[in-house]
Image: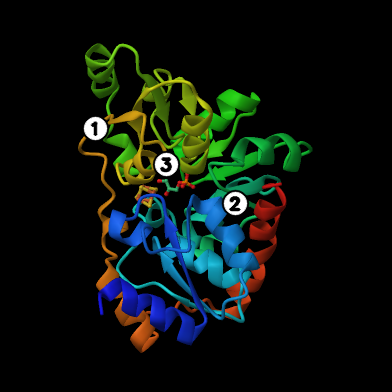
Amino acid sequence: MSIAERIQQLKKERNAVILAHNYQIPAVQDIADFVGDSLGLSIQASKTDAEVIVFCGVHFMAETAKILSPEKTVLLPEKAAGCLMADMIDADQLRALKAEHPGAKVLCYVNTSAAVKAECDLCCTSANAVRMVREGLREAAEIIFVPDKYLADYVSAQTGRSFIVWPGFCPTHARILPENVREEKVLHPEAVVIAHPECPPELRQLADCVTSTEGMCRYVRESTAREIIVATERGILHRLRKENPGKIFYPASRFALCMNMKLIQQEKILWALEDMGHEIVVPPEVAEKARAGIQRMLDFSE
Ligand code: 13P
Ligand code: SF4
């Protein structure tokens, strides 16, 4: 029996569901029950009937699933799979920033630890950050937005609101340079450019569409463009190619790789299901404080 078949068998025995982020390696995406962006995966985690969630992504995503479904067992098949951006701010640093701006509302990107989320009023993903600021924080006089300075810049450009920002960023997206996109455009003059809002502003300005990874899948599906330059982590190209066989995709940069997203393989999923290994634990008092902001994030997905 192949590893994939053993995973399917054990998944049934354990009443488990496999969720995978769009940046996971093809072999993981292909055996998952659901492949999506941070928001889509959180929605799936909150509504699944399964008793076990095998989360193929990075640590903050699995933590978010655990906070939304505390009664379920959430497994991260590779415990070292973290997010470099999420690691750029901790709860002490956020508390210090809040102390400097006592009247400010705090919006955190979902790419943060549970302890940081527990210090926030609202949580957002790249898919709903603009709406969250326009609608959820309309009344707020001052807003702290952590930890991604580039996402904050994007949301600011869309909403006209200014933020107290944290100097965090995603190293994977920061590695995609404007000249990379310009070179690809010269090579493929008919191609449109899609970019993730974690990209720096100079790169974003070259894009025809700036959106979350799920937004990219939707845009490509609905667009008449046949050639697309993709400015985000390269793992998404697998799904884009699979879903759009008639279209041609070019990664904006071959360096746009998130090594943490590549740490999970089919073997590790199988071992996690066998051993119930790398279970995510969030202290109940932290989960309690973080849940309201995450719930608001889901409310703003409809
Ligand atoms: P999405 O929510 O758009 O999938 O982004 C998650 C992420 O980590 C991007 O680097
Ligand atoms: Fe974090 Fe960037 Fe990797 Fe996304 S691509 S998980 S933001 S380090």
Residue assigned mark 1: 253
Residue assigned mark 2: 98
Inspect this view and state whether residue 286 appears: yes
Identify the element where label 1 is drawn: loop
**Depth check: 130 or 37 in front?**
37
**How many other residues sit within 10 Å of disc 2, few (<14), some (14-19) or many (≥20)?**
some
Q: Position of residue 73 (x, y in %)?
A: 51, 81
Mark toward the viewer: 1 or 3: 3
Q: Residue at x 24, y 32 (%)?
A: 253
Q: Position of residue 174 (x, y in %)?
A: 31, 35
111, above or below 271, in the image: above
Q: Position of residue 244 (x, y in %)?
A: 40, 36
Q: Quadrant of residue 49?
A: bottom right
Q: Quadrant of residue 264?
A: bottom left
- Between discs 1 and 3, the one toward the N terminus: 3
Label 1, label 3: how many angstroms apart (C-alpha)? 21 Å
- Between discs 1 and 2, the one toward the N terminus: 2
Check if mark 1's residue and mark 2's residue have beta carbons within 8 Å. Answer: no
Circle number at residue 271: none
28, above or below 231, in the image: below
Residue assigned mark 3: 243
Label 1, label 2: how many angstroms apart (C-alpha)? 37 Å
Of the residues shown, which amino acid type is indicated by label 2? Lys
Identify the element where label 3 is drawn: helix
Is 59 left or right of 67, judged from the image as shown? left
Is 157 left or right of 196, judged from the image as shown? right
Of the residues shown, which amino acid type is indicated by label 1? Ser
Is 237 left or right of 302, judged from the image as shown? left
Label 3, label 2: how many angstroms apart (C-alpha)? 44 Å
